[in-house]
Amino acid sequence: MCFSAEADFVSGAVIGAIGVATLAQVDRPRELPLAVLPLAFALHQIAEGFVCARSRSPIASISRRRSA
């Protein structure tokens, strides 16, 4: 769902900062898979922001009209 590209980018940045802070707290290698999860979620939010921004572009609306 595409609410706002800006909100996706901001949330991706905040979650990414949390992910970096989480990685800094890793003491043992077995903790690493769990510590990487916030970074994976951040990348997902940023990718979703690009999808949302692209779907709102004028070129995207022209291509939707042509394909309908």
Image (cartoon, rainbow, N blue to C red):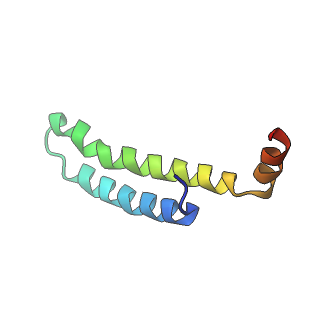
Q: Is residue 68 above or below residue 53?
A: above
Q: Is residue 41 left or right of residue 59?
A: left
Of 49 and 58, the residue lying toward us = 58
Give how far across and how far down residue 64 sits, in percent. 77, 46
- Left or right, 58 with respect to 53, comes to right
Q: Quadrant of residue 12?
A: bottom left
Q: Quadrant location of residue 18?
A: bottom left
Compare residues 8 and 64 and report the one nearer the observer: 64
In the rendered image of this protein, does residue 25 appear above or below residue 3? above
Residue 7 vertical placement versus 43 (above, below): below
Which percent across, then down, holds residue 6? 55, 65
Instruction: State the residue lying farthest toward the top.
Output: 30
Image spot of residue 30 (x, y percent): 16, 34
The image position of residue 53, as x and y in percent, is: 64, 56
Residue in the picture at 31% in, 53% down: 19
- What residue sits 38% from the left and 48% below the top? 41
Q: How many marks?
A: 0
- Point out the residue furthest to the front here: 68
In the image: residue 30, left or right of residue 44? left
Residue drawn at (38%, 44%) of the image: 40
Asked if 24 appears above or below 11 in the picture, the reply is above
Q: Nearer the viewer, residue 59 or 14?
A: 59
Q: Which is nearer the eye, 14 or 23?
A: 14
Which residue is found at the position 32% from the left and 49% from the top? Answer: 38
Is the C terminus in the top left, top right, bottom left or bottom right quadrant?
top right
